[in-house]
Amino acid sequence: MLRLLCLLCFVLGAAGCESGEPPLAPPERLEPPDAGGAPLAYTVDRYDFAFDLTTGQAASRLWLDVEAGARGCVSLSAPAEVTDVRWGKSAPTGFRVADGQLEACGAAPLEGPLWLDSRLRVPEATAPYTQVGFSRRLDAQGRPFTYLLGWLESCDRFGPCDTAPGRLAHFTFDVTHAPGAVVLCPGSLSRRDETHTRCELLGTRAPTYSAFMIASHPAWMRTRLVDSDVGRVELYEPPGGLLGPAIDAGAVAEFLAWMTARFGPLPYGPELRVASGRTDWLGMEHPANIILRDDLPWIGGAYANVTMHTLMHEIVHQWAGDRTTLASAEDYPWKEAVAEYLTYVFEDEHRSDEAAATLTYWDRLARTSSYYLRPRDTPAPPFLSFVNDIYGTGPMILLVQLESLLGRPQVLAGLQAFLAEPGVRSIEDLRRALEAASGKELQRYFDTWVDGEGEPDWPYFQVEWTQEDALTLTVTQRTQTGKVYPCEVELELQGVAPEERRRVTVSYGLEPESATARLVVEEPEWAVQQIVVDPRSRLVNRRSPGLVREPAPHAWRL
């Protein structure tokens, strides 16, 4: 979700610099001694990134928050090809780039900020199995969609960067491009002239995994979809594109009002830009921007309305994933679970036919999952396989199943508290927020459903019944390990005629003591012929153990 000038002209933000001083002065051609001093504690407060879409040339300035006058070395992830490293206004006293790390040394100024400058030619290349990196892809009319796309722990593809998922920072982007190209990037957008576009993300902070983004298309036309008190939504799409006719602008306005009423104003300003692109993933969230796959309306087999579901999902990420972000890579499931769940709740309340299809799709995904939500495998699973595995189990386990046990108002109240402030959150933080909202202890639930090693031992349910003066149901959880899962199981009693249907619920509660639960209900007037478990697909369960794991790709690992 996830993306002709001879001389490169970089114009970086001058905040914090002396008036009139070029932010990136011509480098002194020095060979400083190797690094090797004491580590210098720092955080990156801001990234100024200049990029030429026509050549791939990049210049970075990182503003570091360090102790005034302190001496030592900072270490940042960086590609080996980084050049022209500068320590503030001068060369570093030492630096080296080795094993994917840039180490630069010097003394922090007694007054004013410290910045670290560098240059890099970003290659037109992407990480295996993804579109992460810098790419140009032709659309159906042969026009190039250009995408500089970061993702989790990958911002160092574009220069020195703190790749930790939980780092939030400010950003500016100065983009040089071909005349007439339309360019989008995070934050407020301005166009200096026909070949220069600038974006500033200087209010609400954002994570590097989604903020490093520049997208461009020569034929994008802007159309306003929503203009309301809660925000404006602009669609950027070439003439004849598929997204515009497929997007229900009224429903988008309604969803924005629904979200802002619960989670506050759009985090990155009142304008939200939605653009089409030739992408691998259905959609990708960026601060104040969403990129959707240009053939999204043609994709079937997932949600009832793939375009609207994906758009609403990415809108949720403005709060859940961008403004409030992941504490670590293993916390990725909560981000996608919250975006899916809130989209589903809106569908359930306003687009009920679509909600049923969403649950069915999640259930289908969950039945073939290869990992627990927070895998404890050694070695750790391939990250790409792990994250692709959680789109069904994530929303089902972390939220939908808890609706049955806690109630939807309690789950929504927990999410409101969880997302109330910008910052960094973990799955444990989500558990505590849900506990506070419901007054229930959830540790047993999370221990059984969330954490685990090996292929998930999801339960399946054996149902037996007797019909005498009353209907007695005996439900037994079956697992390979004997683990008993806290849950609530819905059963549909079925007779011969189509109208002979009745639903009942068997609850194991949050602290089940036995794998067997019994329920006595009033006997229906017709004979029960069969009982269907989980008819609405609200519980992760399966009777297909022993799935074969896929081989590990040469890519991310947890």
Image (tube, grey):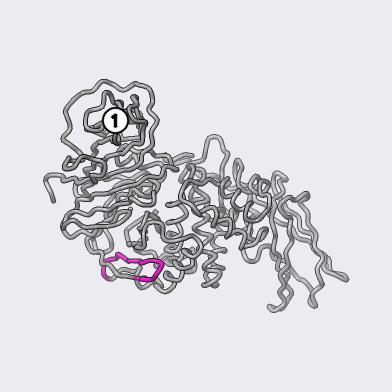
Picture coordinates of residue 419, whole percent (x, y): 50, 54
Magenta-highlighted stretch: main secondary structure?
A: strand
Position of 363 with respect to 91 (left or right) is: right
Residue drawn where x is 28% and y is 21% of the image: 34
Pick whichever, 216 or 129, lies toward us. Answer: 216
- Marks counted in the figure total 1
Residues in magenta, as a range: 225-239
Taking 315 as reference, is 416 left or right? right
On the image, the x and y values in percent for residue 326 come to: 48, 46
Residue 523 vertical position relative to residue 19 in the rendered view, above or below: below
Is 177 in the magenta? no
Q: Could you tell me the amino acid type at mark 1? A: Pro
For label 1, the residue is 109
> Is residue 129 visible in this depiction of the protein?
no
| Residue 498, position as x, y percentages in the image | 68, 78
Does dot 1 land on a helix, a strand or a loop? loop
Residue positioned 67% across, 54% down in the render: 439
Give whichever of 251, 482 is nearer the camera: 251
Q: Residue furthest left?
A: 6
Q: Residue furthest right?
A: 469
Q: Position of residue 129 (x, y in %)?
A: 39, 47
Q: Can residue 497 be seen at all in this image of the molecule?
A: yes
